[in-house]
Amino acid sequence: MNKIKALLLLCMILTTAQGGYAESAAKPLKIKAETTVANMDMVVKDNFVKAKYASAENRFIQSNVKASYDDFNDLINRAEHDDYVFLLYGMKMAEYGMFDLSDSLIERLDINFFTSSYVNDMKRFYYPSGMLNQKDILYLADAYSNIVYNNMALETTSELLNSTQAAESDYKNYLIALGYYKSNNLPLALKYIDYAIKENDLNVNYMGLKAKILADSKKSKQALKVLAKIKKIPFSTVDFQTKIKSIEEYVLYKTAKAEPLKDYHLAYYYHLQNKSLLATKVLQSAIITSKQYSPLIFGLLGRVYYENDESLKAEEFSSRAYKEDNKNYLAALTMGDVSYDNRKYEDALKYYKQAKKISKDAAPQVGIAKSYLALNEVKKSKKLYEKMLKKNIVNEDLLVESLKVIPQRIDYYLPKVASIDLSNNDIWLGLANHAIKDGNFKMAMTYLNNSYYIDENNFKYYYYLSLVLRAQGDIDLAEKSLVRCADINADYASAVNRGYGVYEK
């Protein structure tokens, strides 16, 4: 809730702080009542890419792997250079085992601060020890599709075992282990995942499967030992940090002894899988059966509600958890966030300080710093941000919030946020805003293309697009884009007074 609002506000703060486009000072402009989307060339291109990608993905899921591979390959060959799209597709290709396609995308990237973190995490998590030929890639990708999506784990595992194709690949042993795991043959799953890890002990995906197999086999100590090893491996991007956290919560769910604790970790696992409705159902059921663990359950339930924009429920359950146990980290953090959102900054500061006592995570420290800033204690805020930044803490909120008191670092920190959270649309918009300020409209369009790909209905996208089009002399298209902004969010369009003041003579 909260994070999106903060990021949108930040874009406006940075604009004003750097003498850029003062949105609120612009003159009103009468706009024709038409809804044609601006920049149709880009829209048609991106919609084609999305449709082609969706078709290829659907074919893969239906085990029409050769056709899927050809579609993906055709899409890659025809794609214009766009690091965001290349990384997005590269990760999906690696997940599907189409490592040659993933490699071809990596080779086309501009290897820089933004892309290198994702490339490193992708290879560390997915890649086999050696590159496979195309024939073997298609064979094993077909096996993955059948095991994961088509309920054919038993038949596919048997086929893999009886085939000599790709015999030297550690990835083949991983798929055999995965097939046995999906067939609930845990002893053989463990045997083959050990083969895969022996051949490639750097692949975290293999280690994650082993941890799950051990947890399901009730070998708790061994599972937790593997989990501890996984957690020591550094991942800098949000996507892969979430994958690791997901593995952790699954293992803790399987190894917990008390039923309420099992429910807690299962719910957390569902939440990380973007299945928050399931998470809340599990937690609400657990409340009925457990009083001993109720603060823990209330705390997580409050956090789930908060991250799904249900602030009233978030406050209700977090406050209950905090009253029962003020050492509950999620409860303290959520109460801090809710208080901050409600502009109760003194209360927010109290809760954040309590959360900081409980955990070394960056989130409470960022909360304290931003609360100080909201209370006009700028020096305290800046000092805290600089202290955290000197420690090189890789935290999205830290990098974003610190720019409110250190705006001169925008050139460094906004790209750094993009490098750890590829799908953060508001950062792409912030980068576009900064490029517009610098008059770099070509780069602004690159950032806006990424934003459109993530969310084609973001009102801020159409506002910034109108600025670029206006600067390039495309007045009609600029006007249409601003109309689209107003269609989506009339209040915002009104607040920026149609946004053309900077260009008016």
Image (spheres, rainbow, N blue to C red):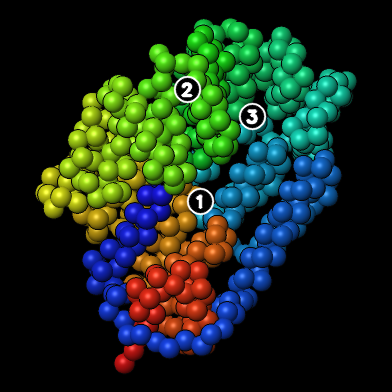
Q: Nearer the viewer, mark 2 or mark 3?
A: 2
Q: CA distance from mark 1 to mark 3?
A: 28 Å
Q: Nearer the viewer, residue 364 or 345?
A: 345
What residue is rendered at 62% in x and 34% in y? 127
User: x, y percentage for residue 501?
Assistant: 33, 83
The x, y position of residue 219, in whole percent, is 58, 7
Q: Nearer the viewer, residue 498 or 187?
A: 498
Which comes sooner in the sequence, label 1 or label 2? 2
Marked residue nearer the N-terminal end (2 or 3): 3
Q: Residue at x 77, y 19 (%)?
A: 183
Q: Which mark is residue 129?
A: 3
**Mark 2 sits on what residue?**
287
Which residue position holds label 1? 423
Kind of residue indicated by mark 2: Ile
Classify mark 2: residues with Cα within 10 Å, few (<14), some (14-19) or many (20+). some
Q: Secondary structure at mark 3?
A: loop
